[in-house]
Image: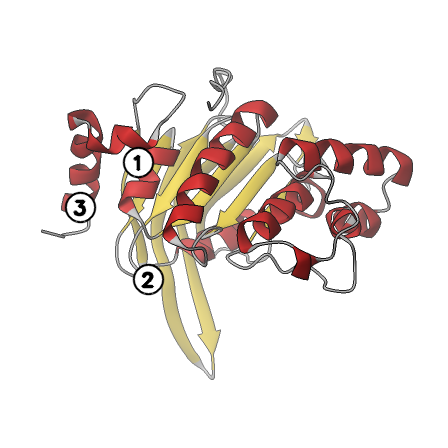
Amino acid sequence: MTATPAPAETGRPFIRMEGVKKIYRTGGQEFLAVSDVTMSVTEGELVALVGPSGCGKTTVLKILAGLHGHDGGTVEIGDPAHPFQPGRDVGMVFQQPLLLKWRTILQNVLLPAEILGLPMQEAKERARDLLKLVGLEGFEEKRPYELSGGMQQRAAIARALVHDPKLVLMDEPFGALDALTRERMNLELLRIWAESGKTILFVTHSIQEAVLMGSHCAVLTAGPARMADFFAIDLPYPRRLDMRQSPEFGVYARRIYDLLGME
């Protein structure tokens, strides 16, 4: 059973985006990728970003990760007294695990700690604890090809957490998995989130997944991205797959469908 997450801290938002705009410039031409994104995220929340393909969801993540600048609006992360450092304070999980095939699972998980120059003995202890957390205890010395797709993605989640980031960004992390594995990984991530207490932004194309996973949901319209709505999903934790059949779940799903102009 998925653990119940601790209540998020109140007070100053951990993430504040206000009227954020992003323009790509190539070959002397401009392309407006994000036109107006506004949201306020409290520390410890799991926010699902849902919207059609090409609407700018990944661009929003890249702005938060410090990989892209923005061309308008305001982006604030963390406490000004302790400046947010994207290279140190962000963990990322992609649609593909992107594990290095010549390294063991433990060595793959340790990669961010190596890049950041963290004390390796402490990092190894944390990596082993994280592999236990994601259900991969005993697989530390295996190579990626010896693990299933779902197990590889669990290793990728452990890798994203090994340097103890303040913010975890996930870009369609389960999109390449089969339906049954994806459902298991949804519940697994909810458990990991509850136990780690991390702030997570989770991009998905799936409305059902957004409602099942999110403590909050950000709905982006077709590109250029505009925030159509940002709302809390007031369903009890632990979340279960059978909740998808409940009237309450259906209300949230229908709200997203309507915002996206889907019948």
Q: Residue at x 34, y 42 (%)?
A: 209
State the separation of the CA atoms marked 1 and 2: 18 Å
Residues 188 and 205: in front is: 188
User: Which label lies toward us, 1 or 2?
Assistant: 1
Read off the residue under disc 1: 211
Label 2 CA crowd tier, 10 Å (few <14, some 14–19, many 20+): few
Read off the residue under disc 2: 53
Residues 21 and 54: in front is: 54
As shown in the figure, which amino acid type bears the numbered disc 1?
Val
Label 1 CA crowd tier, 10 Å (few <14, some 14–19, many 20+): many
Q: Residue at x 42, y 36 (%)?
A: 47
State the separation of the CA atoms marked 3 and 2: 15 Å
Mark 1–mark 2 CB contact (< 8 Å): no
Q: Residue at x 14, y 52 (%)?
A: 261
Q: Is residue 115 above or below residue 224?
A: above
Q: Position of residue 72 (x, y in %)?
A: 43, 53
**First in residue order: circle 1 vs circle 2:** 2
As shown in the figure, which amino acid type bears the numbered disc 3?
Tyr
State the separation of the CA atoms marked 1 and 3: 11 Å
- Circle number at residue 257: 3
